[in-house]
Amino acid sequence: MRSLKQLFRFGWEQALSCVFPVVIFASLALTNVIPMPFLPRYDWLLIICLLMQWVMVRSGLETKDELKVITMFHIIGLALELFKVHMGSWAYPEEGYSKVFGVPLYSGFMYASVASYLCQAWRRLKVDLINWPPFLTVVPLAAAIYLNFFTHHYWIDIRWWLSGLVIIMFWKSWVRYEVGGKAYRMPISLSFVLIGFFIWVAENIATFFGAWEYPNQAEAWSLVHLGKVSSWLLLVIVSFLIVATLKQVKGKNSAEQAIGLKLQ
């Protein structure tokens, strides 16, 4: 019975952490079914995302520090979108006033929603990292993974080498979290895989509702290739590494300030 209660609590905390992604998916579904007046669909999606972001900060569901992280992810994601659309990896076929070089500005919020989930889950589940690798190894790895999304179009794709480095670097690393006051933990590599897989599932839902379109979906919708899980896995790793690094830096600064106040 206690196990079921804990599972329910965990599911509830996860659901609260997914508020922003859920709103995005609901908006994609509704605007796909219901004709939107006055503005193209992509522009309405941008307005909804901006409004939701404002509501989350005003209501306290999201902190101002988390908003800064999410904004950074929006910029990182938008840069990747501009490049990938230019290279023909996928497309946004509908019209929109808020499109820049073929990319609607709302698309950056889909990356920001991943960061929103990580930040929310981190706070709600009181996440802590065990045997986290040094800062000087984590940052170059995150940068290399992100850059490979660009460079593999011109050079060899080294994603599997990078995946191997991730396994080696985080072999002894664990993520600790709390549910109902009880602590649990799992290997960080497993958490990467689980989040990456569920994002792939979400990607299938998003493309079904016309969020974007892969070349093989131009004529009719089809399941996103399972190989995309590796891409999302690496993107999740980049997201996790950035959020974890920022959390650790903030935690260190807070600890130093606390020590400074005690010494005064």
Image (cartoon, rainbow, N blue to C red):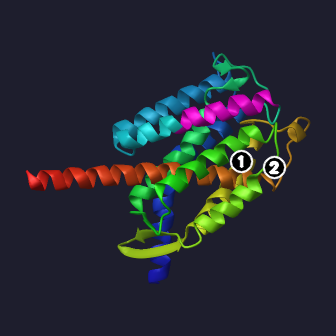
| Rendering coords of residue 260 (x, y %) | 16, 51
User: Between 3 and 101, which is closer to the camera in this rendering?
Assistant: 101
Residue sitting at x 64%, y 61%: 166
The three-letter code of the residue at mark 2 reads Val
Callout 2: SS = loop
Q: Quadrant of residue 113?
A: top right
Residue with the mark numbered 1 = 203
Magenta-drawn segment: 73-87
Residue 209 in view here: no
> Which residue is located at x 70 percent, y 28 percent?
82
Against 219, is 141 above or below? Answer: below
Q: Nearer the viewer, residue 100 or 7?
A: 100
Q: CA distance from mark 2 to mark 1?
A: 8 Å
- Majority SS type along the magenta span: helix
Of the pair 107 and 180, the residue shown nearer to us:
107
Q: Is residue 156 visible?
A: yes
Residue for point 41% across, 36% down: 55
Residue 75 left/right relative to 53? right
- First in sequence, mark 2 or 1: give its number: 1
Residue reaching furthest to the right: 219
Q: Magenta span has 84? A: yes
Q: Amino acid at mark 1?
A: Glu
Does the residue at mark 2 contact the one at mark 1 (Cβ under 8 Å)? yes
* Residues packed near mark 2 inside 10 Å, few (<14), some (14 to 19) or many (20 plus): some
Q: Secondary structure at mark 1?
A: helix
The residue identified by callout 2 is 224
